Image (cartoon, helix red, strand yellow):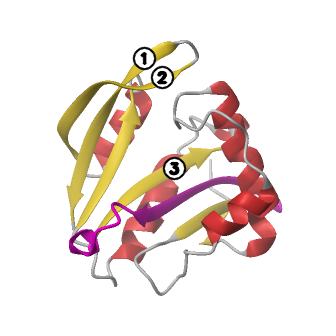
């Protein structure tokens, strides 16, 4: 099946769809440790640090004029010495999972990062999440650490796995 999705940098007009996808994961998943849904205004603040010409990228997949997934790189830590390290995230609309969209988005993200000064990309994966581990491994991430019971969501403490990719 031919992928007919359009991959592009996110625009402010995408915020309602991006917020809807993210809120799905807040309410139904441990993929994020946010526990309360976010508003479009809150996401506008989040959105403000992304720019195609920076190390902080936000790429969307659009199919039939609907945003069906997105991937991003964000600041890893606040201290300046971490500037060339970023954390990656990826969220797929639940109706479009397991169709290769995550791999397609990550391929575009890592291609876009080639023209930046990013040295390391980190991913934090709440366990269990075999699909995310497989996706990251496919793109050259290595497991570098596991934090036990690092977050509490849905009545349970959750472990997180840290992975890294050298660029």
**Badge 2: how crowded within 10 Å, few (<14), some, or many (20+)?**
few
Residue under label 2: 152
Q: Work out whether 27 lies above or below 23.
A: above
Residue at position x 34%, y 84% in the image? 115
In the image, residue 68 lies in the stretch drawn in magenta: yes
Number of numbered discs: 3
Q: Which mark is residue 42?
A: none
Residue under label 1: 157
Q: Are marks 3 and 1 in contact (CB under 8 Å)?
A: no
**Badge 3: how crowded within 10 Å, few (<14), some, or many (20+)?**
many
Residue at position x 44%, y 57% in the image? 106
Q: Observer-nearest residue: 95 or 5?
A: 95
Q: Are marks 1 and 2 in contact (CB under 8 Å)?
A: yes
Magenta residues, as a range? Answer: 63-84
Measured in 3D between alpha carbons, the distance from the residue under mark 3 to the one under mark 1, in whole angstroms, is: 22 Å
Residue 30: x and y in percent read: 53, 28
Residue 73: x and y in percent read: 44, 64
Most extreme residue toward the front is 79
**Badge 1: how crowded within 10 Å, few (<14), some, or many (20+)?**
few
Residue at position x 25%, y 44% in the image? 163
Tell me the quarter of the image containing the C terminus: bottom left
Q: Quadrant of residue 34?
A: top right
Residue under label 3: 90
Residue 150: x and y in percent read: 35, 28
């Amino acid at each position: 099946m031919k992928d007919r999705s359009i991959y592009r940098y996110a625009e402010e007009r995408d915020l309602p769809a991006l917020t809807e996808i993210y809120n799905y994961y807040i309410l139904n998943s441990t993929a994020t440790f946010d526990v309360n849904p976010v508003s479009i205004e809150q996401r506008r603040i989040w959105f403000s640090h992304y720019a195609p010409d920076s190390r902080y990228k936000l790429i969307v997949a659009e199919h039939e004029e609907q945003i069906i997934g997105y991937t991003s790189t964000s600041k890893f830590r606040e201290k300046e010495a971490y500037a060339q390290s970023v954390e990656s995230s990826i969220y797929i609309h639940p109706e479009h999972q397991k169709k290769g969209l995550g791999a397609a988005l990550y391929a575009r993200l890592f291609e876009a990062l080639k023209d930046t000064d990013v040295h390391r990309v980190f991913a934090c994966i709440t366990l269990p999440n075999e699909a995310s581990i497989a996706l990251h491994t496919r793109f050259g991430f290595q497991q570098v650490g596991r934090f036990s019971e690092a977050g509490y969501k849905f009545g349970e403490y959750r472990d997180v796995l840290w992975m890294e990719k050298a660029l």
